[in-house]
Amino acid sequence: MAIPLQAQQQAEGRGITAGGLKPIETAALSNNAIQALTINSLLEATNGNISTALMMVDRAVAQKYDPIKEQIDVAQRNLELILNSPQASLEDKNRAMAQQQIQQAKADQLAQEQENWKNIQKVAVDAAANGADAQTLNKIQNASSPVEAASIAAAAGIYKS
């Protein structure tokens, strides 16, 4: 509830309109939701509620990646309209095909990032369930890959997967 107020206070005197402030608020609220879900997943895992923890990880993944996937999907659908349009010139269709390949590469990269982030969070949940301390959990969650996350957990002696 404090995020919109903070955003308004930060925007005061900077010439930001209400319409310009809304995306800033939305991003802050989304980041807050992602953090809350990941922290709560660790708390649930610590309490032995692994299925609830994993459900929260799935919700955090959706909160973090679904909006980006939607943007890519919209761009791909718009490019498909150009490609299927009888009015579009060959040059326009060629540009649309090139952009479609770029969007597909973005989608593939995003899918990999999403899978990595989800797997890192799962390692953190497993570590929390096995008694990892807050410092170790923080290191795991800040890992750049699932392999690094598992290595951190294994070094702490708490990773069993």
Image: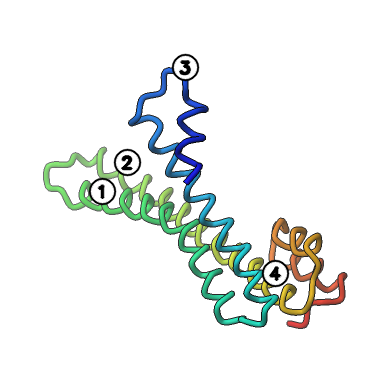
Whole-Å distance between the Cαs marked 4 and 1? 39 Å
Q: Are marks 1 and 2 in contact (CB under 8 Å)?
A: no
The label nearer to you, 1 versus 2, is 1
Question: How is the structure coloured here?
Answer: rainbow
> Which residue is the extreme one toward the left?
86
The label nearer to you, 4 versus 1, is 4
Left or right, 54 with reference to 23: right
Rate crowding at label 2 as few (under 14), some (14 to 19) or many (20 or more) other CA atoms within 10 Å: some
Rate crowding at label 4 as few (under 14), some (14 to 19) or many (20 or more) other CA atoms within 10 Å: many
Who is closer to the viewer here, 77 or 87? Answer: 77
- Residue beneath label 4, please? 124
User: SS for tag 4?
Assistant: helix
Number of numbered labels in the structure image: 4
Left or right, 114 with reference to 133: left
The disc label shown at residue 95, or none: 2
Return the disc, 3 or 4, that comes first in the chain's sequence: 3
Whole-Å distance between the Cαs marked 1 and 2? 13 Å
- Residue beneath label 3, please? 13
Q: Amino acid at mark 3?
A: Gly
Return the disc, 1 or 3, that comes first in the chain's sequence: 3
Return the disc, 2 or 3, that comes first in the chain's sequence: 3
